[in-house]
Image (spheres, rainbow, N blue to C red):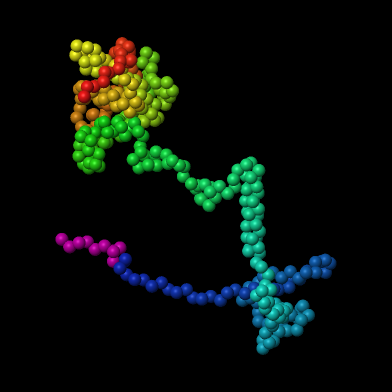
Amino acid sequence: MPPRLNVWAACRALSIRPRPLSARPPLRCAAVPVRTFADSTNTTNTTPAVPASKLPEGYEDVLDSLHGSAPKSPAQPQEPEAALQQEPEPEALKPELQPEPESQAETNESEHADNVLQALDKLKMISYGLNPFDPAVEGHKYGLPQLPLPSPMHMKHRYDDVVVQLTKLIMRDGKLSKAQRLTKDNARRQDMAMILNYLRTSPPPKINPSKPLMPGSPPAAHLPLDPITYITIAIDSVAPLVRVRALAGAAGGGKALDIPVPLAARQRRRMAFQWILDVVEKKPSKGSGRGMFPTRVAEEIVAVVEGRSGVWDKRFLLHKQATSARANLNYKAPPRRH
């Protein structure tokens, strides 16, 4: 079946040339005297504007005779008054005698005013006992950096110490060089971000008075606003202060002797987070996927803050054992025989 003909498509293909407009001469207006009354005090000749095309020929001579001036001849065109009144141009001044432009003079004045203000500021610093030419400020746009450099400006310490330590505890086999690859380590690396995201979006925890947090902690409503502070307070609150070291044969008859030993900050956090991971591994999973493990860890951290976790029982038991063994602190091991 042949296609239908479209009239609009055919019209679009035509090239139409519009008719050029004819040039019209511009309208000229002439001044025509207006007749007034004999007793009129207005002596000014008000001349309304009338198009020159509607006036008869020779109207210029008539107007000149009415005003008392001689008629104009077409052979002698009248020169403009501006050309007759123009004075001869003076001689060009020498370059060294030319006046200074106003813009440059204003610029010099503003620079002089700025210099005066800077000098006054330096005098004020001297009056206060300060050094106006301090090398840490003078000559530097942003000043010299603070020495020693703070830890966030170092590449290996740009993250929080607690986050870095817990991330390494979550990883397996210690493969830091493969953390950026699409391997199991990369999923473990992303677990910490998911844990912090869960803490940030969770509701404020309900603090248990019987299991308080460490002194100086912010209110419970402020913890979700800063997830790094959230997880740091949870781990530092449940972290043990000491550990019990068993010395084999120290009690006599081959019996071990328990001696409490204080722990550093990193050791305390490592032991507390290991307890949390042990509890998480024993809990049944609620589903499958990469998000299940970090979700269970975040839920256990919230349980620690609220006092519902079993990690608190481990801490109380360890402190009770260390308190009962505090009498063994003065024990001195006998010298070894060579």
Q: Quadrant of residue 5?
A: bottom left
Image x and y of residue 306, in percent: 34, 19
* Quadrant, the C terminus: top left
Q: How many marks?
A: 0
Q: Where is residue 124 shown, x and y percent of the image?
A: 65, 45
* Direction from residue 110 to residue 215 in the image, left or right: left
Please determine whether, in this image, residue 100 is positioned above or below residue 219: below
The image quadrant where one finds the N terminus is bottom left
Tell me which residue sits at (63%, 64%) in the image: 104
Query: Residue at left 28%, top 24%?
Result: 271
Q: Which of 63 and 165 is in front in this view?
A: 165
User: In percent of the image, x 25 and y 31: which residue is there?
Assistant: 170
Can residue 219 be seen here? The reply is no
Q: In x, y percent, where is residue 34? A: 74, 71
Along the line of sight, the residue nearer the viewer: 270 or 98: 270
Residue 105, above or below 204: below
Instruction: Place residue 63 in its image quadrant.
Output: bottom right
**Magenta-drawn stretch, dominant element (helix, strand or loop):** loop
Query: Residue at (33%, 33%) from the top-left corner?
Result: 163
**In this picture, is 187 found above or below 232?**
below
Q: In the image shown, does 199 or 164 lie closer to the viewer?
A: 164
Residue 54 in magenta? Answer: no
Membership of 5 in magenta stretch: yes
Q: Give the range drawn in magenta.
A: 1-10
Residue 4 is at least partly visible in this image: yes
Residue 286 as seen in the image, left or right of residue 267: left
